[in-house]
Image (cartoon, helix red, strand yellow):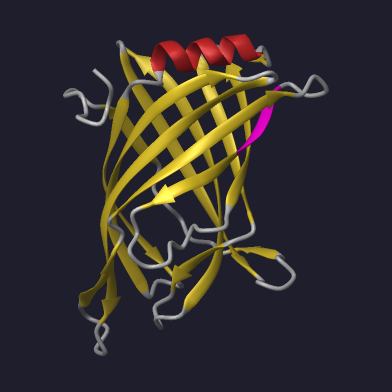
Amino acid sequence: MTIADPQRVFEFLKENVVGRAVVAPPIITNTDRGRLESAFEEDVIYSNLCRTATGFSFDLTNLSRGTRYLPRSDGKEYVAEGTYNTVRVLRYEMALRRAADFLIGHARFLSSTNSHPDPMAGTAFLVRMWMEDDVLLVDERMSGFAEMVSADGGPRPVAIDGVYRYAVKDGILVVCYQQTTYEVDPHSLERKPTGERFPEQVSKEASVPSPLLPA
């Protein structure tokens, strides 16, 4: 059953998400037509849940650690080319739209520790949220595009969409994320699926509280 009740979503976030941290195991991906390999992992912390006149807002802090690898000229081995090590803070701002069965809003970047221009700078996500039984679903679609590093070292315009499923299993918060990527024409903003396949990322609540969480 799909539920558009913003109070139900707010209570789910308050009781099961905000104030907690989840950890994703390392994953390996191949992008840019298989020419770039990446290995990374991340932790996510949720905080600052606040009611607003039309809905609510909260912050997501992402602690990312990873390495990009480029193939050698012989194509048989990869060498480290750069890292994904950074801390980003996003703010979600959601509002009820009575014409639909979901909350609608956006997620925007507040800050990044990236010492180089952050590839996500200037982007935002159109966000929808709704409950299906006891599961919170979050659908995100990127506006504009991120500038990812290509295997040639130049910028690669990419848009990232994703779907999150938040559920509590045996008292532990579990977050499943599935990503879809698109090549973007930087002038027309026309999208074309990259065809890249990413493994589902399954994050689980950290057994040890993060030092960044309030006491």
Foreground pick, 35 / 114: 114
Foreground pick, 101 / 1: 101
Percent across and percent down for residue 24 are: 29, 39
Percent across and percent down for residue 132 are: 58, 17
Foreground pick, 212 / 105: 212
Q: What residue appears at the point 50 percent right and 18 percent down from the top-left corner?
A: 135
Left or right of 64? Residue 147 is right
Query: Which of the 4 image quadrants contains residue 20?
Result: top left
Q: What residue appears at the point 59 percent right and 49 percent down from the top-left corner?
A: 124
Dominant SS of magenta comes to strand
Q: Is residue 41 magenta?
A: no
In this picture, is 166 found above or below 31?
Answer: above
In this picture, is 184 found above or below 108?
Answer: below
Percent across and percent down for residue 193 are: 61, 61
Residue lying farthest to the right in this orientation = 99
Left or right of 126? Residue 177 is left
Q: How many marks?
A: 0
The quadrant of the image that shows the N terminus is top right
Percent across and percent down for residue 66 are: 26, 57
Query: Which of the 4 image quadrants contains residue 125?
Result: top right
Left or right of 42? Residue 98 is right
The quadrant of the image that shows the C terminus is top left
The magenta span reads 102-106
Foreground pick, 210 / 51: 51
